[in-house]
Amino acid sequence: MRTERPVETTAPAPAARKFDLASVRADFPILERPINGHRLVYLDSVATAQKPRSVIAAEAHYYETMNANVHRSIHTLAAEATEAYEAARARVARFIGADDARGVLFNSGTTAGINLLASCWSAELKAGDEILLTEMEHHSNLVPWFLAAQRAGAVIKHIPVTDEGRLDLTALPEVVSARTRIVSLAHVSNVLGTVNPVAEIAAAVRKLAKGAVKIAVDAAQSAPHCMLDLRTLGADAVAFSAHKMLGPTGVGLLWVRPDLLEQMTPYQGGGEMIREVYLDRATWADIPARFEPGTPNIAGVAALPAALDYLESFDLPTVAKHEADVLDYAMEQLRALGGVRILGPADGRVGSLSFADKRVHPHDLATILDQRGVAIRAGHHCAQPLHRRFGLIASARASFYLYNGRDDVDALVDGLREARRYLG
Amino acid sequence: MADIRALPQLDDLYREVVLDHYRKPRGRHPLAAPTACTDGFNPTCGDQVRVAFELDGKRIRDLSVESQGCSISVASGSMMAELLPGKTIEEARGVTAAFKRMMHGAPLDPGQDLGDLDALSGVARYPVRVKCALLAWTTLEESLRSITHSPAGESRTGIAGTDGPTTEERP
């Protein structure tokens, strides 16, 4: 894993585009749309990111020039669509540092990826085997494992979260045992923004568990910041979503170590995942097709490389520095305002800034901010156990991406002041 | 209130009556011997409410609403606690139905008096907040259903649904 994020991946990068906030924003058509008479200040990228013009154009280009089903027909359009689809697979592999693109599966999103893992991996579990999760997971990295554990008679354990909002690694000897078979954890928390030391945890767990442990990573919040590098992550599987990284909705990416994938029984049956079908049985296609039944979101997949190209067109450390500056400024401004409880650590975080105002409920804040064009998330952000851990029902979450700037933070803080004048 | 003039749309949502109920919610007292006590939960945001009431025959003698949530859900529950004691179950159902219609943008029937609830009419323009305003009311509905549809003394009814209240009857 990259703790110093991000560094260069495989291919030598072409000359990087200069990172300039105004020109970046100009690439996102939606940012031109006024909301309730104000400039759109989009602080909900952790829920879904906005799309640059190049991604929107790529999806339209696919439909306008090559729309056909993949891996089926012989005609020119089908050949081109298939080529675009498989080129996207190779592009994703390059993005995450995978040397074998057969490990990259397309599906509908991170949730679908984790469900696939939970289903396939739990088939090998015995009653009493343990699945280790963490207290900071998104519901989509909890509930699929609950279902799997129920089926297998397995036991769910979790790594606790410290008051500061980091995983408590001192608890590892208590929560890892010889029965630990699966670990699934977030690379970056969607609430706290905490960057978890996945490689360190993976190594520690493997040492403590002694037996064979499979490690899955929910990378939904780290992939958008180009932090994924399989060569150092120490994971057996990684799930993430295109829509959180400037790409289209409805495209999920799941990488599984190809040798593992080869051994896994198919998750869902259907067309395209088979080799031969008889009236009562079938044999399976090679990976990755074995895990991609049915017609996928071809247009979305075809447009995904445009998103990755966009992200990697900049000098990555420069973008990371900009994002860190905006996040730090936001924390600083909220602290200066006072009366706000910021969740998560003071450093080592990316993306999310969740907070609870002492006087204004997150819903009210979200409504008042929306009237000023500021979009935040209010609620439990699909992480009820984590909110419970901090004694909260809900929080307000501002999340930041490369198109956000200090002016967005100012709009947030001004809006919070206004909300307090209403409700305080 | 220069700030409210600055955002006229919000003026309609956060009327002074609403804010007053939010700041000083009525009817938060726990009841000694409630006829029914129902917890409501909004899974999309996590807001919680507990509605309990004591019946005297068919009349609501006392009602308490304990909310954990935003200004709209707290105010709506507080208004309920102020409005319903003394009303019959049928009257309470009538108020609930009228308030729901109001939240879906329909005008009130002539002669229908919803008291302070009228101040929540602006919520109808904020579809995502309608659920907040209705949480206490859908919980009450569930509670009323539980006492009329199941024999007294039956313990716990889990009810799945958008607002997912669970009902615990206390004889």
Image (spheres, helix red, strand yellow):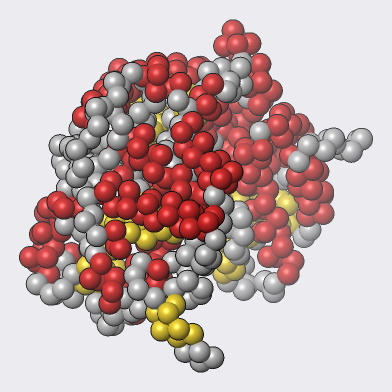
The image shows residue A110 at horizontal and vertical percentages of 40, 55
Q: Quadrant of the N terminus of chain B?
A: top right
The image shows residue A344 at horizontal and vertical percentages of 27, 38
Left or right: residue A418 compared with residue A317: right
Query: Depth check: A339 or A86 in front?
Result: A86
Q: Could one spot residue A11 in this view of the protein?
A: yes
Give me the residue at 49% from left, 61% from top. A70
Q: Quick one: which residue is furthest to the bottom in this view?
A: A280
Query: Depth check: A309 or A161 in front?
Result: A309
Q: Quick one: which residue is furthest to the top in this view?
A: B2
Q: Quadrant of the C terminus of chain B?
A: bottom right
The image shows residue A207 at horizontal and vertical percentages of 7, 65
Give me the residue at 39% from left, 23% from top. A24
Q: Quadrant of residue B159?
A: bottom right
Q: Could one spot residue A144 in this view of the protein?
A: no
Give me the residue at 40% from left, 19% from top. A23
Query: Depth check: A174 or A15 in front?
Result: A15
Left or right: residue A421 compared with residue A395: right
The image shows residue A368 at horizontal and vertical percentages of 55, 24
Please, is residue A210 above or below residue A339 in the view? below
